[in-house]
Image (cartoon, rainbow, N blue to C red):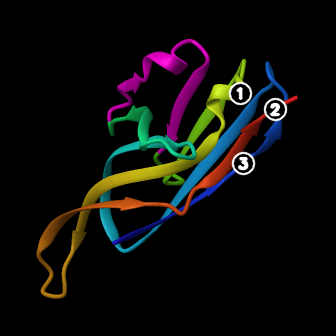
Amino acid sequence: QVQLVESGGGLVQPGGSLRLSCAASGTFVRLNDMGWYRQAPGKQRELVATITANGVTTYADAVKGRFAISRDHDKNTIDLQMNSLEPEDTAVYFCNAGGQARDAYGSLSRFSSWGQGTQVTVSS
């Protein structure tokens, strides 16, 4: 099992930058794909960026060229560097992680966990 904690959100002016962090902890054996998702008021949750265990990244079209996801395997963390922020980026940003953990009998099982989210507000 894994617990995810996001940090780094806040209020920023259009054109500004923020860096989000997600720290994973728990009894998991390994982490596989991790990523960032966001949800604005009245809208569905959408994918922002993902990164595999091998470092392969994907981005939503809306953030390509502006956001960059990175991963630190030693610290079990991922970051999201957000540049040239726009009001449309305003949302709660959630961290997601998939991986494997051992159940009560010691058998491996897959999991997908979510953090509680961090608010990003882009406004002048």
Which kind of residue does numbered mark 3 sit on?
Gly
Residue underneath mark 1: 87
| Furthest residue in direction top, as rendered | 65
Residue at the (82%, 34%) spot, across then down:
12
Residue 5 coordinates in the image, percent (x, y): 57, 62
Q: Is residue 59 in the magenta section?
A: yes
Residue with the mark numbered 3? 8
Q: Looking at the image, which residue is at 43% across and 23% down?
A: 59
Front residue of 33/41: it is 41
Three-letter residue code for mark 2 = Ser
Q: Residues within 10 Å of mark 1 (few under 14, many from 20)?
A: some
Q: Residue at x 33, y 72 (%)?
A: 1
Image: 44 above or below 123:
below
Identify the secondary structure beneath mark 2. loop
Measure the alpha-carbon separation of dots 2 and 3: 16 Å
Give the quadrant of residue 61: top left
Please check the rendered image and state whether residue 70 is part of the magenta-colored stretch, yes or no. yes
Mark 1 touches mark 2? (CB < 8 Å):
yes
Q: Which mark is residue 123?
A: 2
- Identity, as a three-letter code, of the amino acid under mark 1: Pro
N-terminal of the two: label 1 or label 3? 3
- Measured along the vertical axis of the image, is residue 9 above or below residue 18? below
The residue lying toward the viewer, choosing from 26 and 89, is 89
Q: Secondary structure at mark 3?
A: loop
Q: Dot 2, crowdedness within 10 Å: few (<14), some or many (≥20)?
A: some
Tell me the element at label 1. helix
Q: Which residues are magenta?
A: 54-72
Labelled pair 1, 3 in contact (Cβ < 8 Å) = no
Q: CA distance from mark 1 to mark 2?
A: 6 Å
Q: In front here: 38 or 54?
A: 38
Q: Which mark is residue 30?
A: none
- Distance of label 1 from label 3 (alpha carbons): 17 Å
